[in-house]
Image (tube, rainbow, N blue to C red):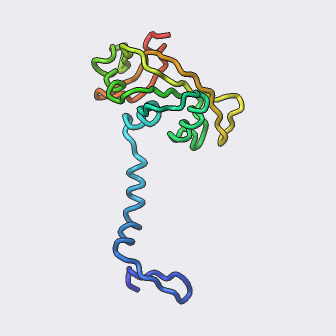
Amino acid sequence: MSPEIATVGPAMKTRLGPGLLLLIFLLPACLTAAGRETPYEKFQRQHVDTSGSWEPDPNRYCNLMMPRRNMTVSFCKDLNSFVHGALAMITAVCGSGGTWHHEDFYYSNSPFQVTDCQTTGASRWPRCIYRGDICSKRICVACKNGQPVHFARPSVCGGP
């Protein structure tokens, strides 16, 4: 049997074009590659919101964003913070926009608008329920190669 012909039923045959064959073989590889993210990309997915029109209700915001950013796929992530601002400004915390604190940790020189999302007592995976709180505060991040890769509580950098 030719590799371009597939049996669909007991006596049915259908012809698969070269484009479809290519898609069948390349799709799994593309999905695997898409599943790998760098630490900087993971930081962006989990902690950065550059959209200028984010949801003003912090509870609704958290309950929309946590699943949207894949943080409720196999468990309810207990606590997460979203920093609202330009990616360049957030990344600058690892350089001129921040002050080295210790090890790889930098404390932002200026405050950012931050939404903290915390699970409620009613959260039971797969139904994750979050309570949100919006505030303006300096952020503490761990940096590698001039890029933020981990968001830390401000107290890690000596903040409140």
Q: Give the image location of residue 155, x and y in percent.
A: 48, 13
Q: Residue at x 37, y 39 (%)?
A: 38
Q: Residue furthest right?
A: 122
Q: Residue at x 60, y 35 (%)?
A: 63
Q: Give the image location of residue 54, x and y in percent.
A: 49, 32
Q: Give the image location of residue 133, x and y in percent.
A: 57, 22
Image mark count: 0
Q: Residue at x 46, y 30 (%)?
A: 47
Left or right? Give the position of 94 relative to 79: left
Q: Is residue 159 above or below residue 143?
A: above
Left or right? Give the position of 155 relative to 87: right
Quarter the N terminus occupies: bottom left
Q: Quadrant location of residue 106?
A: top left
Q: Give the image location of residue 92, x and y in percent.
A: 31, 23
Left or right? Give the position of 130 relative to 152: right
Q: Quadrant location of residue 26?
A: bottom left
Q: Quadrant location of residue 122?
A: top right
Q: Is residue 130 above or below residue 94?
A: below
